[in-house]
Image (tube, rainbow, N blue to C red):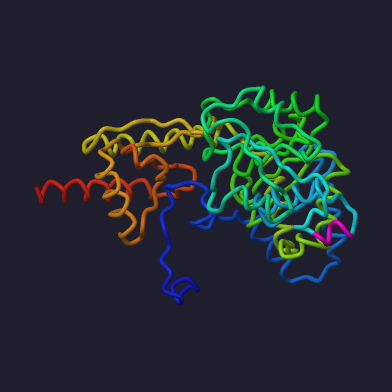
Amino acid sequence: MGYLDELNVPRAINASGRMTSLGVNTLSGDVLAAVTEAGRSYVDMRDLRQATEERIAALMGAEAAMITTGAAAGVALMVAAVIAGDDLNRVQSLPDALGHPNEILLQAGHQVSFGAPIVQMIRMAGGQPRPVGLVNSVSEAHLTGAFSPQTAAFLFVQSHHTVHKGMLSLARCVELCTEKGVPLLIDAAAEEDLTHFVQSGAALVTFSGGKAIGGPTSGIVAGQRALVQACRAQNGGIGRPMKVGKEQILGLWVALEAYMRRDVDAERSRNSRLVDELLAGFAPFAETRRLADEAGRGIERAGIVLSPAQAEELVAFLEKGIPPVHTRTHLVNLGIVAFDPRPLADGDVGLIVERVSRFFERKENTQ
């Protein structure tokens, strides 16, 4: 028996994506070896952080980088850095900004929940969120008119959770913020093209280390050296509950090195093949659709198109099976159940198709 068996926690088939609710990802042998080595060793944490963060910055093409517990922590640390800098009194007074500029602008369509409200990450760091424009329409005038002496930064949220229609592009936001001398921060938690965002002109950007990168639960803040140093200074304040362990640090570094060397074409070819197999397996039972990624990443998924009520039934049926099959449910209210190929292991496609066929056969038998 394994530990999961001992705890009576079933293993799941993840057709949802790199989701926190499903443990994000599985770790490669090299990353597991790094985590084990760190777990068996004592080390000066300052030495370990400095060595790995210098290498991570170099890999990403950034002036500096910092390892965090995740992208959500990265948002809080970035906000704290632009408000308090590395002044110890201000760092240790947060979330009280002591009268210093603390407004954090963000487009109204970016005011989302990723499992927790993005604005809460801002507030816990002493920031005052100020949405700009309307939920489906933000103009340049909305943004430029929002800049004030109280503006500490502008936060751009790059995510499938956000509204994409009617929002200002990242490139234009960078230009407008640069003209006003306002730091632009990016939450790029699940993004795949790390260097694109680092080199976008943003002051700071945060990524999840456990999603696209494939590391243990962790994150990265990268960008301007002085602001990264200010993020590190928060370890003497609100950053203390967000501290990372040696296992996360070493595991993330090994995962990132492998990620930057990966064969993107081979990955996408493999994922496309799995989508083909899923669509072919679903076709006898329902209308199918090949789905592009909502946030514009190079990800495609297999979709089943039903009524919203039937879609909810299918999701529930799959999750109640043994092992449970978890789907991507972002579009269930539109009647679309999506299957992400990236986390699937050998044999998962056959099991998923068999389970879906059982659902439709069961529906026919009860009609």
Provide the major secondary structure of the magenta segment.
helix
> Residue 237 at what x, y percent from top left?
80, 62
- Residue 59, by quadrant, is top right
In this rendering, would 64 be left or right of 30?
right
- Residue 302, by quadrant, is top left
Residue in front for this viewpoint, 243 or 217: 243
> Residue 350 at what x, y percent from top left?
33, 47
Asked if 23 appears above or below 204 in the picture, the reply is: below
Residue in front for this viewpoint, 101 or 336: 101
Residue in the image at 49% along x and 56% along y: 22
Residue in front for this viewpoint, 225 or 77: 77
> Residue 189 at what x, y percent from top left?
63, 44
In this rendering, would 290 be left or right of 238?
left
Which contiguous range is marked in magenta?
89-93
Would residue 59 be seen by someone viewing this image from the given angle?
no
Asked if 1 appears above or below 133 in the picture, the reply is: below
Q: Which quadrant is home to the N terminus?
A: bottom left
Q: Is residue 92 magenta-colored?
A: yes
- Residue 138, by quadrant, is top right
In this rendering, would 63 be left or right of 343?
right
